[in-house]
Amino acid sequence: MKCVVCGLRDAVVMQRHTGRVLCRDCFIKDVISRVEREIKKFHMFSDNDRLLIAASGGKDSYVLLDIILRLHDPSKIGVVTIVEGIEGYNRLEDVEKVRRLANVNGVDVIVLTLKDYVGYNLTELVSLGFNKDIRVSPCTFCGVLRRKAINEVARDLGFTKVLTAHNLDDEAQTIILNILRGDLFRLVQILPNGPMLSKLFVRKVKPLRKIYEEEVAIYAHLIDYEFQTTDCPYLRYFPSLRAKIREYLYKLEKEKPGALLNLIERIDAILAKHVSRYVNYPELPRCAICGEPTAYGRNYCMACELLTILGVSKPSYNRSSYLRFSPRS
Ligand code: SF4
Ligand code: ZN
Ligand code: ZN
């Protein structure tokens, strides 16, 4: 069967949400142009911005780097990876592929381990919690500390935007999660141009938010990404409500292709009418321990609170203990 766009080459991809069959080149072009459209629609970044890509090393961050390299000056791009330190799982092996792609394009890669950052790796933090019978999932420690570290590294190194590789499926799950919690405040923050509540935050944007996970996987395959064989062993602790929502949304999309894209577009349109309400919100308070922003009404940030609960008496963060791999040096 021939590609419905160019009519010349053989089709290799069935794009479920449009019902089209596409050749390799037209599929790749389609994904890039949709990402570009989303970046422009929400003014995610401009030519002058210095972009820091937060990479986990999986297919999503590899695809994000590949696309951003085609759309932005590589000398204004960096990649950061936080190595959690999880027994039986070597994050650096995954990141190696991203590092190679960054390297051939002259992009710096910054690697920071949790051990260097807070003095404990994730496995040590999880066992501290286990010994104290604290029921906090490893993914909570992981997510909270990674987000904090990435924001601080970006700010210290003068990056003006942080790009994460969340895809359409992730975004739809986050929307449903916040609707179920009745949390309009958090829901509004999914908008790429949502309110910035602290000067200490570097704005985070998600250029792949309208690209299905399946499309990201196909794109990765078409650009010869080697899929990893090991998963994080803590994946089974992944917050259970999100896992259930993910399963439900997967079924919904299978029965009604395009349903999740439609959901995000409608929610975006509704939220756009509410976003102005949050523009004049006061600056977030600062954590009494580390000085970073925390939620309204709180004295400590989540990271300091979690570490204190685990028995770490004076949480401190050594955010400059990263390694920098610079192809230019
Ligand atoms: Fe971190 Fe959980 Fe992902 Fe493992 S599965 S890397 S613990 S968020
Ligand atoms: Zn084609
Ligand atoms: Zn703090």
Image: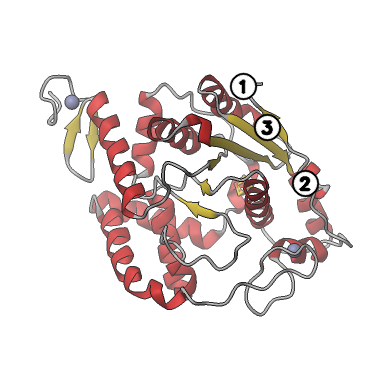
Q: Nearer the viewer, residue 328 or 271?
A: 328
**Which residue is identified by label 2?**
117
Q: Secondary structure at mark 1?
A: loop
Of label 1 and label 3, which has the lower sequence position?
3
Of label 1 and label 2, which has the lower sequence position?
2
State the CA–CA distance, disc 2 to disc 3. 18 Å
Whether label 1 touches label 2, CB < 8 Å: no
Q: Secondary structure at mark 3?
A: loop
Q: Secondary structure at mark 2?
A: helix
Q: How is the image coloured?
A: secondary structure
Figure check: 127 above or below 288: above
- Front of the two marks 1 and 3: 1
Amino acid residing under circle 1:
Arg
Residue 263, image quadrant = bottom left
Figure check: 131 above or below 283: above
Horizontal placement of 20 versus 153: left or right? left
Q: Which mark is residue 240?
A: none
Residue 231, image quadrant = top right
The residue carrying pointer 3 sits among few (fewer than 14), some (14 to 19) or many (20 or more) residues within 10 Å by Cα, namely some
Residue 14, percent from left and from top:
22, 34
Ligand 3 positioned in quadrant: bottom right
Residue 217, image quadrant = top left
The residue carrying pointer 2 sits among few (fewer than 14), some (14 to 19) or many (20 or more) residues within 10 Å by Cα, namely many
Q: Residue at x 79, y 60 (%)?
A: 307
Q: Which mark is residue 328?
A: 1
Horizontal placement of 174 versus 97: left or right? left
State the CA–CA distance, disc 1 to disc 2. 26 Å
Residue 53, percent from left and from top:
53, 40
**Which residue is identified by label 3?**
90
Q: Nearer the viewer, residue 143 or 322?
A: 322
If the image is split into quadrants, where does the C terminus sit? top right
